[in-house]
Amino acid sequence: MSRFAGKVAIVTGSSSGIGQAIAVRLGSEGAAVVVDFLNHPDAAAETKAKIEAAGGKAITLHADVGKLEDVQNLVEQAWTQFGGCDILVNNAGVEKNAPFWEASEADYDLVMNTNLKGAFFLTQRFVQKLMEAKKPGRVVNISSVHEDMVFPNFASYCAAKGGMRMLMRDLAMELGPYGITVNNVAPGAISTPINAKLLNNPTQLKALLNNIPLGRMGTSDEVASLVAFLASDEAAYVTGSTYVMDGGLMRNYKEQ
């Protein structure tokens, strides 16, 4: 199956976890993928190797999505090396744990720059190039259930993801006339390296699973499947929506 034959995708933060699964999924279905990483070139090379093993094409690029010149370079390299860019997945994200009254300016800036500013300006450059070429496109943001659900001690993360929800809704309106769709995927508890500490704490894990009607954590591959749908022509009439993927957590959540 080659849903993305001839398409080019940028996936930020794709050296591990959800980002890696998305990049490999798109690449395995025919897309040429720009694999973005910040701190782990070896892991990015692993993503590239997995894509190539599945018959796809990929390049790896270092970028700090909080820096304007870095995100612009991601788009320029996609066009230079692959001849265009049709799909953007804003996946790169970070969170910092602190009571609101103790949160530092440095941590706030890191969270907002990575999760919201990066998505804003990367999408802007992606869209500018599509407009110049008069081509349609797909933007999929990896948001979080915390675009809508509280997360005590993670105020900056909630603010960033809430901002991403409204940014998506606004851009869906602004970009619709140009054939560019914008949607969010909002994962809940997903089994990824970032959650290793939780997965190895039986008490915390049991408390979490008790809040999830399906009784388990989700997988990166499940998130990737939803992203692939939203990035494909099958979702051509879908824009301005958040797709929650949380096993029912949001409908059942109670603070312990």
Image (cartoon, rainbow, N blue to C red):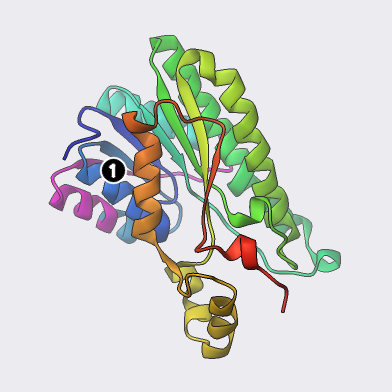
Q: Nearer the viewer, residue 197 or 178?
A: 178
Q: How crowded is mark 1: few (under 14 residues within 10 Å), some or many (20 or more)?
A: many
188 drawn magenta: no
Asked if residue 90 shows in the view, the reply is yes
In the current view of this chain or complex, which residue is farthest to the right? 101
Give me the residue at 65% from left, 50% from top: 147
Within the image, what quadrant is residue 171 found in? Answer: top right
- State which quarter of the image contains the C terminus: bottom right
Give the amino acid type for the residue marked by disc 1 in the picture: Leu
From the image, tell me which residue sits under label 1: 26
Side of 186 where 254 appears, left or right: right
Residue 123 coordinates in the image, percent (x, y) = 52, 30
Give me the residue at 51% from left, 31% from top: 182
SS at badge 1: helix
60 drawn magenta: yes
Asked if residue 67 shows in the view, the reply is no
Instruction: Establish if 207 lies above or below 240.
Output: below
In the current view of this chain or complex, which residue is farthest to the bottom? 203
Instruction: Establish if 244 lies above or below 201.
Output: above
Magenta highlight range:
46-69
Residue 181 coordinates in the image, percent (x, y) = 48, 27
